[in-house]
Image (cartoon, rainbow, N blue to C red):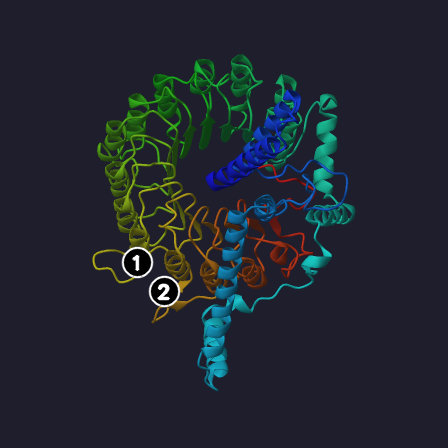
Amino acid sequence: TCCHFIEFSCFAVATMARTENENDDNGGDREIPQSMRQRNRAVAEREASRLARPEPRRVGKLGHASRKKSAVTSTPSGYNYAANREESKQEVEEWCGPFSVARQMIAKREEARRKREEEQGDENKEHHPLDEAMDLLEMEKKRKAQPSLQWKASGVPDAASSRNQYSKRQRRVEKEAKYTVPSLFSLCVEFLVDNFEYVQALGDVDSMIRRNICEALVTKQKMNGAAFDVIAEKGVEALELVDCAEVTQDQLAGSLTELLPAGLRFLALQHSGRCFGPKAVKAITSASSCRLFAIAIGGAYLLKDEDAASLISTTASTLSSIDVTACPLLGEHFCKALSENYSSNGNGTLLELSLENLAVTKDNLVSLAKSSDALKNLKRLKLCQIESVDDEVVEALLDAVDRGNLEAIDLSHNHNLTDETLSGIRRCNKNGALRSLQLCELKNLTEAGLAAFFTHTIPGLPSPPMLKKLVLNNCSHEAVTDTVMELAAKCSAMNREAVTESLSTMGGLVHVGIHGSSCTDRTMESLAATSARTLKELNASFCPLISDKGLGYLVSKALQLSTIHIWGCAQVTDEFLDGHSRVGDSSLEVIGAWMKQNRVFSVQ
């Protein structure tokens, strides 16, 4: 740009000097008017500024159909902005001037020489008659090692015939909506919810149907006090509410006073901060007959530590499943009540314990594990999003389960856990009963630790677990790899009753979560080889190394697969979405594409 400015300045000075000389040769008879001098100076200043700092030519919004010239695009990915920027840059630099012309000539000469050298290199390369045969042999070996490479999409039109992805997807959604018939159950629930103000009682309806009705009422913002009275009618064995925000404490206490003597066995209240407090606890503890075997409370900010301890002490004889989420006042008294009432000297048997987002301390948890044998019969353990949970706490709790009967472990969202926790989980699995393992967002886990967890023949440790559900979402990107998933898949399908360990045709993973991992198509091939008859759900969101061929190959093999999550997988194209073998199968749902199936837009 400095050279541009110097060239133009020299040109302007030479022009002015030539004009003055011409005036001197004419004897000074002709004098340039002052207005013309000012106009020439203004032109020189304007042109010098433009040539000194050349800027891309601005292209306004045009009303034609040319995509390169228009500022508006109708495609999801937009037009090639980089190419247009280079074109505009070349247009600006092509101006008159010796330096610029010379630079353009040098650039063209270098480009021509580069192309000429590439062509000469290809010509001079030695060729052997067997090169083509060797290339075919290498490709055949690669295809045998990676069978997903042989997968081909079916029924996918050429890119040239389907450039507008918006219109194509819209036509597909409209076609599905036209031929999709809602189930009779969904129609009945929808009709019932629309007219729920006229419903006085549901009668002999099981808990599953009541839950669906409650969810529909919450969705349509009709879950009020009157609706609660209809759902919580006398005689129900399970009261499950997904949202209790509109239920008062007096209303819940009154309902529990009637429901508990009538045979209420299961109580699940989510978002119960307003209703589940001292009055509700008093209604449970003072009931003439209480046979609760499972209780799940979420968001009860009115529930005090002493009240929770009193609730455990009263119901421990029948209560075997406890699920507490986001109750900030629970602490020492609650843990102490668990330790005392479920020990050998107590009168209860604890089978399921779920603690999530609580403010309990490390000492409280360690005391719960070591002060008694309250956890000896535990089958399901969930400790999520508790700041005080670390490797020492997990080891103490797992050691307390001395019978090795744990079937499900969930330690998600505990950022202090490391590979030491994996060693404790494997030592706890003495009887091989573990079937579900969830370790989401444990950033300190490593690939070596996970690989060792699923490796056989480690001295001093039991065999790796034969899992049905493995969720490793949002762990470290380098930790969850193809090697780890291949070992996990083989362990899940291992037939250990035979004389020699071999893969079983009935074993395999059912639910797999590898969200945010570095897994590739090799993981899809491993799942297809070991879990083709069992796999039902796969979460492969934000896995940039999984391609259309890997997903298409898995879908063609796993006929039981019903749900695939592919959020954030920009590399997945219509080759898989419109070309896999189960495109017309309504039992397979692909979630996270540009649109969801079944007329529902993706809103994540």
- Name the residue rendered at 67%, 56% in the picture: 585
Q: Residue furthest front?
A: 27
The residue at which mark 1 appears reads as: 463
In this view, the residue in front, 383 or 447, is: 447
In this view, the residue in front, 134 or 8, is: 8
At label 1, the amino acid type is Ser
Residue 32 vertical placement versus 578 (above, below): above
Residue 75 visible somewhere in the drawing: yes
Q: Quadrant of residue 150?
A: bottom right
The residue at which mark 2 appears reads as: 496
Tag nearer the camera, 2 or 1: 1
In this view, the residue in front, 516 or 123, is: 123
Residue 292 visible somewhere in the drawing: no
Q: Mark 2 or 1 closer to N-term? A: 1
On residue 598, the disc is: none
Drawn side of residue 496 relative to residue 561, left or right: left
Q: Residue furthest right?
A: 178
- Name the residue rendered at 33%, 36% in the picture: 415
Crowd band around label 2 with a 10 angstrom C-alpha radius: few (<14), some (14–19), many (20+): some
Crowd band around label 1 with a 10 angstrom C-alpha radius: few (<14), some (14–19), many (20+): many
